[in-house]
Amino acid sequence: MKWMVTGAYGCIGSWIVKNLVERDQEVILYDLQEDTSRMKMIMDENALSQARFVCGDVSDTEAVVKCVADGGVTHVIHLAGLQVPSCKADPVKGAAVNVLGTLSIFEAAKAAKEQVQRVVYASSVAVYGPVEDFRAYGDAPIPNDAPQKPRTHYGVFKRCNEGNAQVYYLDDGISSIGLRPWTVYGPGRDLGLTSDPTKAMKAAAMGRPFQIRFGGSIDMQFVDDVAKTFIRCAEVEFEGAKSYNLRGEVVSVDTLIQSIERVLPESRGLITRTDNTIPITPSLDDAELQREVGEIPETPLEDGTRRTMGTFHRLHSEGRMDTADLNQ
């Protein structure tokens, strides 16, 4: 197998690369610029040297097609994209990266149809829209085929990608799986509103106060589990084009804070929250994903918290802790 990971230097991408390198897989890191800061938190220099960086823009279709063809890529994991605030501030640029970039990936798979076996891409829970649109489900998790009513450019772009993936299967036979992560946490998660739980763990490990910018309930998904799920979706026998909910451990933010305090009792009182809530339904059903690919890894929240804070303690002791993301 030969892999290409776009957006490879982000949090999820770094963990996917770590997992692939540990299995001695050939990996191309396709990104706008080389930034190994997150990877260095979880990989040594020898492991880093085993992956090959290719500088490129996912919205440059010709460059993406060339990279896939020349690299002999058989499996593509597409993560590159702009987040909600960036898409809101500049919808045209957001569409260029999030929609046209995804089309470039499928065009590359189409051009190398006999070579590329699978495309797996990051969709988002943002395709669903706000909590109030799902009150009819009561306390039940939202099923995979629930109506999609996104209220952001970002969510609409992700819904568009899911639709385009289906068309590429219908027209060209390109099989793909889209995954909809929620609150991904762990070493390397430092961007976006839902990075606050990870920042809280970092602050606690440093003995610093931190306020999580929201309360309510969230779905906590440990990044190594998410990375392994992306890889499994790329390898499992599958035919078609589907997008799936990804579920971790649905907890209140208060429960998250208590987990941090149990792992590090001396942090008690350092981590607080606001009363704001994230306007996305927190509980999604991933039964359809598990039926398709088998049981997926799920690290209990307290274990994931302990692993995350352990990494932060190690980095701090080595003088390599970057705390710039704590300055809200």
Image (cartoon, grey):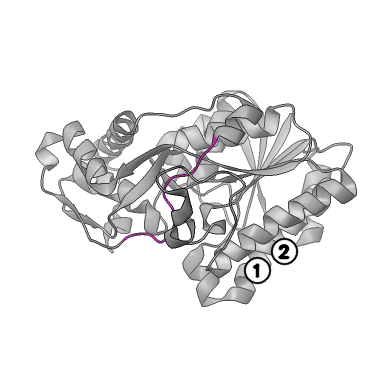
Report if residue 62 is visible in the image.
Answer: yes
* Extent of the magenta region: 277-286
Q: Is residue 58 visible?
A: no
Magenta: main secondary structure: loop
Viewer-side residue, 89 vs 35? 89
Q: Quadrant of residue 16?
A: top right
Percent of width and height locating residue 6? 64, 49
Residue 46: give its label. Answer: none
**In the structure shown, which secondary structural element does the residue marked by tag 2 occupy?**
helix
Residue under circle 1? 95
Q: Quadrant of the N terminus?
A: top right
Q: Are marks 2 and 1 in contact (CB under 8 Å)?
A: yes
- Crowding around mark 2 (Cα neighbors within 10 Å: few <14, some 14 to 19, many 20+) is some
Is 281 magenta? The answer is yes
Residue 307 vs residue 85, the one in the foreground: 85
Spot occupied by residue 53 in the image (x, y as percentages of width and height):
64, 46
Counting from the top left corner in percent of width and height, residue 220 is at 38, 42
| Circle 2: residue type | Leu
Q: Is residue 278 above or below residue 311?
A: below
Q: Assign the C terminus to one quadrant of the image.
A: bottom left
> Which amino acid, by three-letter code, is at mark 1?
Ala
Label 1 crowding class (10 Å Cα cut-off): few <14, some 14-19, many 20+? many
Q: Is residue 175 left or right of residue 142?
A: right
Q: Considering only order in the chain, which callout, 1 or 2, is on the residue closer to the N terminus?
A: 1
Secondary structure of the residue carrying numbered label 1: helix
Q: Residue at x 56, y 33 (%)?
A: 287
Q: Is residue 266 magenta?
A: no
Q: Which residue is mark 2?
A: 100
> Label 2, label 1: how many angstroms apart (C-alpha)?
6 Å
Residue displayed at 64% across by 75% down: 92
Foreground of the two, 9 or 144: 144
